[in-house]
Amino acid sequence: MGSFKSFACRYCDYTEPSIPVGRSARGPKLVLFVCRHCKSIGSTWRQEASGRDPVCSYCYDHDLENIGSSAELKCPKCGESGILSDAEGGWE
Ligand SMILES: [Zn+2]
Ligand SMILES: [Zn+2]
């Protein structure tokens, strides 16, 4: 079962209250990314077997930076540091 992360910037208004991450029962995995194109944080399916580049779930651009699961994250909007934390709930 997957879980949710939330991101909140301490300086500007940018927040992402629930970003699904983790692995589904069938195998594909949702990983966090920062999109350099539309400057947002989200998650995208990583299909290890297909070899295709993951795309941004907002603008479908390929210019993504995988951010792993570090707790301190730079805000893509303003460049200041924000906080990544665990959010409530889960998904299958
Ligand atoms: Zn910000
Ligand atoms: Zn994007």
Image (cartoon, rainbow, N blue to C red):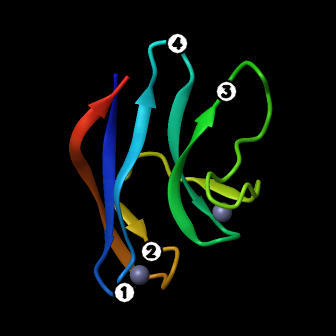
Q: Is residue 81 left or right of residue 37?
A: left
Instruction: Report the residue marked by disc 4.
Output: 26
What's the amino acid at mark 1? Cys
Which image quadrant: the N terminus? top left
Residue 16: % across, % down: 38, 63
For the residues labelled 4 and 2, say whether their Cβ atoms are less than 8 Å apart.
no
Type of the residue with mark 3:
Gln
Q: Which of pointers 4 and 2 indicates the residue nearer the eye?
A: 4
Spatial CA distance of label 1 from label 2 is 9 Å
Q: Secondary structure at mark 1?
A: loop
Amino acid on which disc 4 is placed = Arg
Please, is residue 1 above or below residue 32 in the view?
Answer: above
Give the amino acid type for the residue marked by disc 2 in the picture.
Answer: Cys
Q: Does the beta carbon at disc 2 come under 8 Å from ligand 1?
A: yes
Q: Is mark 1 within 8 Å of ligand 1?
A: yes
Residue 56 visible in the picture: yes
Counting residues from the start of the chain, the first of labels 4 and 1 encountered is 1
